Amino acid sequence: MQPGAVASGGLSTAHNWPQAGDGSVTYAEGGDWIHVKAPGKPHYGGGARSLVTEFSRQSQGRLRRLFAKCDKRQVQPGTMMEVGLTYPGKDALVPRNPREWHRHLINFRKRFQRRWGTYWVVWKLEFQRRGAAHYHLVVFVPGGSEELDIQEFRAWLSRSWWETVGSGDEDHLKAGTHAAWAQKWCKLGAYMCKYMGKEVPALVDEETGELLNIGRCWGQWSRELAPIVERTVEALGASIWAIRRAVWRYTGLASRSWRVGVQAFVPCSVAERLCVWQT
């Protein structure tokens, strides 16, 4: 009987999904992420996207998983640059329309790529206590300081962002940006937790009282250049259930028998041993 059919007696079988077949294990080489997908009901997505009014927990989770997938063997000291883009200190010069913030970021990206070329960049929208928006970026530069001179970049950055915003404020030109190399992966992780894990407050239109659509809270440029390589091991048969239980025990996650798949922060070395153990 097919799932979703009605059995004799009027009982629905929508909850019954075939459990036969093979699952898969996907992990990030050199990273700290694993996805165990057991046989079961497929996932079809979360439906139509609504207005974005906050930095949801789901979005935060996707951002954390993105950085957990990075191959730490490729992220050597001095290859990840932390960049900040802020608006003027005078409130009268700060744009309040989310469309304008994103337009500034798009125009800045065009300037950046014309001058420095294509790099993998992750950006995050953040808010100051006064309500002004600002951006935090992480730029992956494989060649480090030999490929990109930090002093030259800082000089270009301050003027380029100042011209992009068009505030005309000299103080903004002097103190509207910052850039620094992250020397340690743990330091970069702390930077992510401090800024990229913060929630974006819901914004309300002062005239109508309606929630504003702030658009995407984070994103990335040139995803294909990210130091991320995912490996998938298929056809594990019944052993997929043992691997899923092992991941639950290793991470301390609560067991959910109804959950078809599980994603967790697990070192690559552990993920590889799990696959060898059950294959």
Image: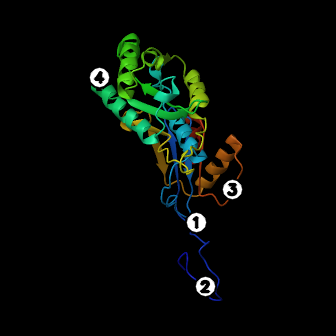
Disc 1 versus disc 3: nearer the observer: 3
When asked about the image quadrant of residue 250, the answer is top right
> What is the distance, in whole Å, between disc 4 and disc 3 at their CAs?
50 Å
Q: Which residue is mark 3?
A: 256
Q: Is residue 273 left or right of residue 111?
A: right
Q: Which residue is mark 4?
A: 115
Q: Residues within 10 Å of mark 1 (few under 14, many from 20)?
A: few
Q: Which residue is mark 2?
A: 7
Q: What amino acid does circle 2 point to?
A: Ala
Q: Nearer the viewer, residue 251 or 19?
A: 251
Q: What amino acid does circle 4 point to?
A: Arg
Residue sitting at x 36%, y 27%: 164
- Disc ID at residue 120: none
Quarter of the image with the N terminus is bottom right
Q: What amino acid does circle 3 point to?
A: Arg
Residue sitting at x 46%, y 40%: 97
> What is the distance, in whole Å, between disc 3 and disc 2 at their CAs?
27 Å
